[in-house]
Image (cartoon, helix red, strand yellow):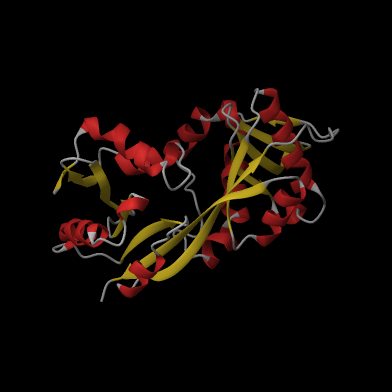
């Protein structure tokens, strides 16, 4: 039967996800966030066989995410369709620009299910892992973020990711506002944020978390093609290894072939592929 999600369901949902795909803390938070509407398909004997989530997002609250998952052994029995149509009742009276969903490719992916419903391919996200040794050290000096670099860093994000965001319709195309909220966000992340400077002028930046994951990495357009991307990645790898990580992870959009080629040339392997699809309002 379909029922509402309960707090004690979280562990079982995480466990069933691990049967078919790789998941990380971002996946868990996305699926079980308190702002989400969550329903589960609960079999009295076998327990939870699937679930679906729904959330509104966007600056104008005019977009929605839907995510549905059924354990591999219970697929093609109509459970996914039941969960999908039940969760879609949440949008009946909401004016949305589009609904998006994510499909992690596994041994029995659900792409055809969504395309038959009218969903269109949006973009592809890849997760890559590195299990290698330290990279050659560079003479370049990366420094930790300070508030005095706020304007440079924010503008660097805006210009460096503009083409990627525009080409993949990630709105807004200029990705961050130069406001106090964003200033506080950067300061709150300063322990993980490293900058490469030349006479106090920003060249490149990389975020490195102590759990071994690499976040936003960019080289300003005027410095691209000069080897700074490779050296920034080598710095990030060595920093993560220094934190004690034997598995370094990062994600990338498949559109960014230049970055993907760099990551793979350094020894990263693609370990998970996630397709994002959108259904536009009629």
Image location of residue 212, percent across then percent down = 60, 31
Image location of residue 255, percent across then percent down = 60, 63
Q: Residue at x 42, y 58 (%)?
A: 103
Quarter of the picture holding the C terminus: bottom left
Tell which of 41 and 102 is nearer to you: 41
Residue 166 placement, left or right of 229: left
Image location of residue 167, percent across then percent down = 54, 67
Tell which of 233 and 157 is nearer to you: 233
- Callout count: 0
Q: Is residue 175 above or below residue 242?
A: below
Q: Is residue 249 above or below residue 74?
A: above
Q: Could you say which quadrant of the image residue 148 lies in?
A: top right
Residue 197 appearing in the image:
yes
Image location of residue 141, percent across then percent down = 78, 31
Residue 200 appearing in the image:
no
Residue 92 placement, left or right of 24: left
Q: Residue at x 57, y 61 (%)?
A: 164
Q: Is residue 7 above or below residue 85?
A: above
Q: Residue furthest bottom?
A: 282
């Amino acid at each position: 039967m379909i029922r509402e999600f309960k707090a004690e369901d979280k562990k079982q949902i995480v466990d069933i996800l691990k049967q078919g795909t790789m998941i990380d803390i971002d996946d868990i938070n996305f699926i079980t966030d308190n702002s989400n509407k969550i329903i589960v398909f609960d079999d009295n004997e076998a327990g939870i066989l699937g679930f679906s989530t729904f959330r509104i997002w966007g600056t104008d609250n005019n977009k929605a995410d839907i995510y549905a998952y059924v354990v591999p052994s219970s697929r093609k029995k109509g459970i996914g369709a039941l969960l999908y149509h039940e969760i879609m009742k949440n949008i009946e009276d909401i004016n949305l620009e589009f609904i998006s969903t994510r499909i992690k490719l596994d041994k029995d992916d659900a792409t055809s299910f969504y395309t038959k419903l009218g969903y269109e391919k949006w973009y592809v996200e890849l997760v890559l892992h590195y299990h290698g040794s330290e990279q050659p050290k560079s003479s370049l000096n990366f420094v930790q973020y300070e508030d005095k670099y706020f304007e440079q860093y924010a503008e660097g994000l805006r210009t460096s990711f503009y083409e990627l965001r525009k080409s993949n319709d990630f709105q807004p195309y200029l990705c961050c506002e130069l406001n106090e909220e964003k200033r506080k966000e950067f300061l709150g992340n300063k322990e993980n944020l490293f900058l490469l400077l030349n006479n106090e002028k920003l060249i490149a930046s990389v975020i490195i978390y102590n759990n071994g994951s690499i976040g936003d990495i960019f080289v300003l357009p005027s410095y691209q093609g000069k080897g700074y991307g490779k050296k920034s990645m080598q710095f990030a790898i060595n920093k993560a290894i220094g934190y004690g990580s034997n598995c370094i992870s990062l994600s990338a959009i498949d559109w960014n072939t230049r970055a993907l080629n760099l990551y793979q040339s350094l020894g990263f392997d693609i370990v998970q592929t996630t397709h994002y699809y959108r259904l536009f309002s009629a």
